[in-house]
Image (cartoon, rainbow, N blue to C red):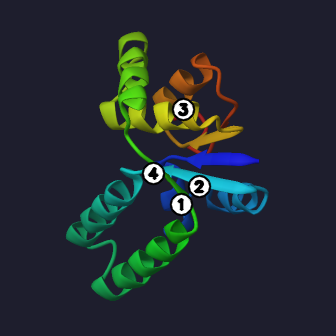
Amino acid sequence: MKLVVDSSSLAKRYVQEFGSEKLDLILQNASELALCIILVPEIISGLNRRIREGALDLKAYRAVRKRLLSDVRDAVILQITPSVISQSVKLLENNVLRAMDAFHVACALEWGADLFVTSDRRQLTAAQKAGLRTEYLGQPGA
């Protein structure tokens, strides 16, 4: 199965929260994992926010960063190409969506993902409307 995971969902691999166990099962069943090029900076940004808030110490951050960089080494990194930009514009014009979230969906569409995993309701809706098979890992009702 060709799998694309967005930042909010892959972060669950490094910070235990709702959906972390389900993500692990999905990753085990993937034959190929692809990630949008913006994923690593987005996760690093979130982890640094946790450091500033006191929810994560520097030692834990370094361990998580090392694991993240190791994990993405084996993934296909999806680039933001002119086609992905065009697809992102269409997604933004037809959905309530943030630009970075549109890039994740557009990359999944361009790559021909069999499954797109997100923890963001708006991104989920946009991906479904675009014809992607999806899995939602966010909180129920969120």
Q: How far apart are marks 4 and 3 (CA)?
A: 18 Å
Picture quarter containing residue 30?
bottom right
Q: Distance between the residues labelled 4 and 1?
A: 9 Å
Task: Give whichever of discs 2 and 3 has the lower sequence position.
Answer: 2
In front: label 2 or label 3? 3
Q: Quick one: SS at disc 3?
A: helix
Question: Which amino acid is tagged 2?
Answer: Phe
The alpha-carbon separation of the residues under discs 1 and 3 comes to 24 Å
Please name which of the two marks, 4 or 3, marks the residue nearer to the observer. 3
Residue at mark 4 to residue at mark 2: CA–CA distance = 15 Å
Q: Position of residue 90 (x, y in %)?
A: 41, 15
34 above or below 115?
below
Q: Please state which amino acid type lies under the numbered disc 3.
A: Glu
Q: Residue 18: x and y, percent? A: 59, 55
Check disc 2: other Cα within 10 Å, few if <14, some if 14-19, many if 20+.
some
The numbered mark, 4 or 2, whose residue comes first in the sequence reads 4
Q: Is residue 53 left or right of residue 114?
A: left
**Residue identified by numbered label 1:** 12
First along the sequence among labels 1 and 3: 1
Mark 1 element type: helix
Task: Give the residue pinned by disc 4.
Answer: 7
Instruction: Identify residue type, mark 4.
Output: Ser
Q: Is mark 2 in CB contact (under 8 Å) with mark 1?
A: yes
Residue beneath disc 2: 18
Residue in the foreground of this view, choosing between 79 and 94: 79
Quarter of the rendering containing residue 137: top right
- Labelled disc at residue 110: 3
Nearer the observer: mark 4 or 1; the answer is 4
